[in-house]
Amino acid sequence: MSTLTITTIQTNLHWEDKPANLKMLEEKIFGIKEKTEIVVLPEMFNTGFTMQPEKLAETMEGETVAWMKRVAMERKVVLVGSVACAGGATGLATGETVQATRSGQNSFTNRLLWMLPNGQYGYYDKRHLFAFAGEDQHYTAGNKRLIASVKGWKINLQVCYDLRFPVWARQSSFAKASEDKSEYDLLIYVANWPERRSHAWKTLLQARAIENQCYVVGVNRVGNDGNNIYHSGDSMIVDPLGEVLYTKKDEEDIHTITIDKAQLDTVREKLPFLKDGDRFSIS
């Protein structure tokens, strides 16, 4: 139970065309040849990074959540990705989640979903809204993190712009030299991160791994969106020492990797840096 197999899907997206995106992604997911346990999709995988939630957002009872439930069940994987969600906090998680999020009623959120094969789910509403693109004018920010668990792994799930804010990702409980009390083992970021700031994306993914002594998975889209903004992908998997285990630029790619908790435990035992961290709380 010490390993976890993850598949990342770096893909172009059909701009604001949900049927086309769901059809395309279903073909990619069912085309994965390796045995895998978690499949990670980009941010707003069904629409692209849209600022039209009034037109395109769905409730938790909508077609995209139903699609995620069906695909996760049929493929027997945990399916991860974010969507524009309408209606505030409906359908609280009953699965393997520690925390859930709250948002205003009748609002829109950029909601990351952690969909289990049995149809149970957890969700995280993006905390840091990208004001530079007007996201804060169309969506409501979340206020709590989601730490999911599977096979003994604790997984912190975040969205795109959250990557720029290290306090939001920081381990909030610290390991003693003799015992592991780390809050989580793996950080997952789903994104629509433009190529023009790809250096920041790559650097910050490695920084989050090093400072939190955890694995980091960042999944980004490729191609031009409906605003003619180019995305180079640069999806990345980073080990707890900051070493890049996988990355891919410009091309669509599906990559499966198995990460090992024994390696993570060894790093934390030999380099017990977390125990010297500053104590803090997030309000």
Image: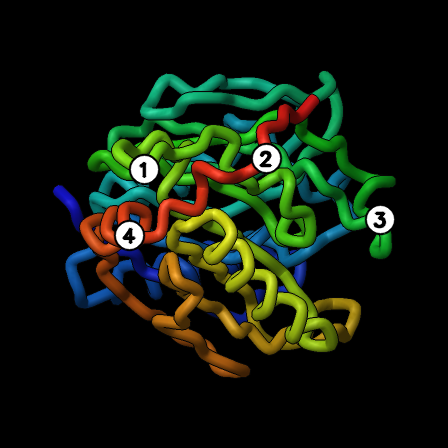
Position of the N terminus by quadrant = top left
User: Of the residues under marks 1 and 3, which one precedes in the sequence?
Assistant: 3
* Labels 3 & 2 near each other (Cβ < 8 A): no
Determine whether the residue tagged by mark 1 lies in a helix, strand or loop.
loop
Question: Residue 258's image quarter?
Answer: bottom left
Q: How far apart are marks 3 and 2 (CA)?
A: 29 Å
Q: Report x, y in % for residue 121.
A: 39, 28
Q: Report x, y in % for residue 218.
A: 49, 60
**Residue 248 visible to the viewer:** yes
> What's the residue at 53%, 39% (across, down)?
277
Residue highlighted by disc 4: 270
Amino acid type at circle 2 is Asp
Q: Tell me the mark number nearer the camera, choosing from 3 and 2.
A: 2
User: What crowding class fits label 3: few (fewer than 14 Cα within 10 Å), some (14-19), or many (20 or more)?
Assistant: few
Determine whether the residue tagged by mark 2 lies in a helix, strand or loop.
loop
Residue highlighted by disc 3: 131
Determine whether the residue tagged by mark 4 lies in a helix, strand or loop.
helix
Amino acid type at circle 1 is Ala
Relative to 105, is 37 above or below?
below
User: Of the residues under marks 1 and 4, which one precedes in the sequence?
Assistant: 1
Q: Distance between the residues labelled 1 and 2?
A: 16 Å
